[in-house]
Image (cartoon, helix red, strand yellow):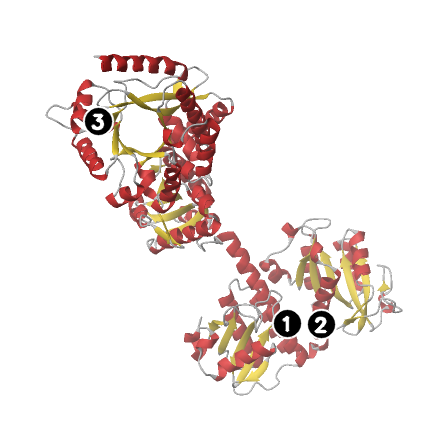
Amino acid sequence: MGHQRPADAEDQLVFATEGEDAAAADAQYWTILVVDDEPDVYTATCMALRDVEILGRRLRFLHAASSIDAFELLKSHPDVAVVMLDVVMESESAGLDLVVRIRDELKLAKPRIILRTGQPGYAPEMRAIREYDINDYRIKSELTRTRLFTVLTAALRSYRTLDAMEANRSDLQALLEAQTELLGANTMPAFALGVLERMGMLFRVPGEGLFCGGGRRAGDFDEPPRVVAATGRYADWSWRRIDQLGDTPEAHAVELAFATRRSVHAGGGLALYLPSRTGSDAVAWLATVDLGHRLEQELFELFVQNTAGAADGVRLVERLRDAAYVDGLTRLANRSALAETIDGALRVPPDGPMRLLLIDIDQFSELNETFGDRIGDALLHGVAARLEAGAGSAVRVARVANDTFAAFGPRDALVPADWARRLDPPFEVEGLQIGLSVSFGGVEFNRECASGGEAIKMAYSALKRAKQTGHRSVAFYSHEVATEIKERTRLLHGLRQAFDQQHLFLMYQPQVDAASGRVVGLEALMRWRADDGRLVPPDRFIPVAEQSGLIKDLGAWAMRSAIHRAAALRAAGHGLRMAVNVSMSQLLVPGFEQMVGDALDEGGLPAHALEIEITESVAMQSPDIVLPKLGALKAMGVGVAIDDFGTGYSSLSSLEKLAPDRLKIDRSFVVGLDAEGGGGSIAEMIIDLARTLGFKVVAEGVETLRQRRRLNALGCHELQGYLFSPPLMVDDLPGWLAHAALADSDVDAA
């Protein structure tokens, strides 16, 4: 190893120009040719190394501003040891073309060539290094003074060895072939097998042994290194940890090499220590009775150096491949890998029908906001594990976005209902039971899919359609779906604009006591009047708001507006309960309870005058999430009602834990009360259940006197529907309430 000379040493550096006679350089200098069309690069290189001595010699620099000039200069300077070569000069391939001419036309095999580029996109791949016989390549910005020294030292050591060992051509050729072949490996197991094979060839012994690596530098491993590859009688040792090899000479030799960080003869063989710049050192142990001294020391060192460098290169390729094709969190294939898999199926169509499914976790962003990234990541791990466990070998599972997974394979193996069932059991994370639901977007594999990327886009269109329909939905791509998605996108744009311009408003539908007909409450209902004056149905824009996340802002606005309206009516003598619908997305917003409390304080409304309505599916989806939220609201005095009861999947134990104030019978069950011969058995069961559990019942959608009488007879507590009043504009409320109060007074007087 060379050393740096003092900064004030004399004759620190010799500068040379193209026209200088090569004979002026003597054996005390290493001649370095800098080929770059930017003079500043040459000057900076010289200045950075002006006080440096490497391997006992000072440096002598030549400069060529083009590949043509460099070619002519090399003709007259056969003593050039290192060529530092720019990739892009007079053309994008000028640097690589010059490499070919140096090796093929000038027959110069000894000069070490270091490719430098200021544009990372032009840096060659491993294949280019193999084919063009490039010693190393670097990005110019990486080449600080220290790194220049390191790179040149390695190159000069290689050059000096080549120069000194020309008489040993056979071993030298084997060494270079080993380096080239090892650089061609693209996985560590393949590389490790190649190292063992080449070691056997170099030392003229059977290539039988172990290649061990993994973890950080010796002495600092998170866990003991593993056998990455094994050959001969050790073949069944692959992937074992070193501490699992038992009390064997081979294990002791490998451990000794790791501990001392040097190659050792032990255990009847050679343990070759391969240091790493990335911290992932390795040891290759070759079994033999007596290695002898077949290689000169410098060739041996060069083999170690080149093999260690190649190992770093293979690790880099593996990391780059992982970054390009493997999801870093779940270790599933990523979107790029999935697209390539589909592309392969397009090139060679499979025998049977294929399908692509996107699997999206409903409301995952809200869950992540509520519990934090650690819980969110654990949920994603759990989902990935369940999906992959049930996939089978014919199905490729991937993670294509934050909370979106994909599966591609035979159509019969990709039935959405089957995949949804795998995710139905709650996930237990840090003591929490978290239930998830998923929606699916699918594409039937056909010739319309021009590429894997196009197929994924089509599946996303279908997924958007499913999400807009609601949670736990499934949609498959069609031209009609694509058209609908465009319309929904326009609808969302219009909804955002309407909210920003305050074109949304609330209407209020009365709730009456079933026995007396007295008004006891109001339900706030969000409405949107489009620019053409027509009302946009809530079942069109509410799902869009929920799917886009806009419901959080809309819901907060509706909550505050309804509370202020209830407080104003209360001040006018109408002490009514105000019911406000709340979605799962709103419940999961961190600080939702505090927002409700602040709104009550701002509006001056008692907490008991507010009732939160949530659907049955929301209430039961993730009890560990919902119950604490609703419990906090109930502790404040806020009432809780379960909307659309009977359409979900409640259990008695869940209802008892939730302890709502009211169950709201869905209008679909109220309609049956008009049927001849009875009907309405579900409504009757809900009322009986509520009576048993001590809850009150509100029936929605009451439109006929027959329905009212039947509900009264069954013991329903409150009624809501067009029989009493449609939803009312805010300006119509006072008059309607006054009239209703007068009617109640007349009834009481009678």
Q: Residues within 10 Å of mark 3 (few under 14, many from 20)?
A: many
Mark 1 secondary-structure assignment: helix
Give the CA separation, mark 1 to mark 3.
83 Å
Give the CA separation, mark 2 to mark 1.
10 Å
What amino acid is at disc 3? Val
Mark 2 secondary-structure assignment: helix
Question: Where residue 212 appears, x then y in whole percent?
Answer: 51, 73
Dot 3 corresponds to which residue?
Answer: 670
Give the CA separation, mark 3 to mark 2.
90 Å
Q: Nearer the viewer, residue 621 or 334?
A: 621
Mark 3 secondary-structure assignment: helix
Q: Residues within 10 Å of mark 1 (few under 14, many from 20)?
A: some
Q: Quadrant of residue 361?
A: top left
Indicate the quadrant containing the C terminus: top left, top right, bottom left or bottom right: top left
Give the vertical position of 98 relative to 617 (above or below): below
Give the vertical position of 338 relative to 522 (above or below): below
Q: Residues within 10 Å of mark 2 (few under 14, many from 20)?
A: many
Disc on res. 100: none
Dot 1 corresponds to which residue?
Answer: 305
Q: Are marks 2 and 1 in contact (CB under 8 Å)?
A: yes
Q: Is residue 599 visible?
A: yes
Q: Is residue 249 left or right of residue 566?
A: right
Indicate the quadrant containing the N terminus: top left, top right, bottom left or bottom right: bottom right
What amino acid is at disc 1? Gln
Q: Nearer the viewer, residue 4 or 667?
A: 667
Question: Where residue 553 appears, x then y in whole percent?
Answer: 47, 31
Disc on res. 157: 2
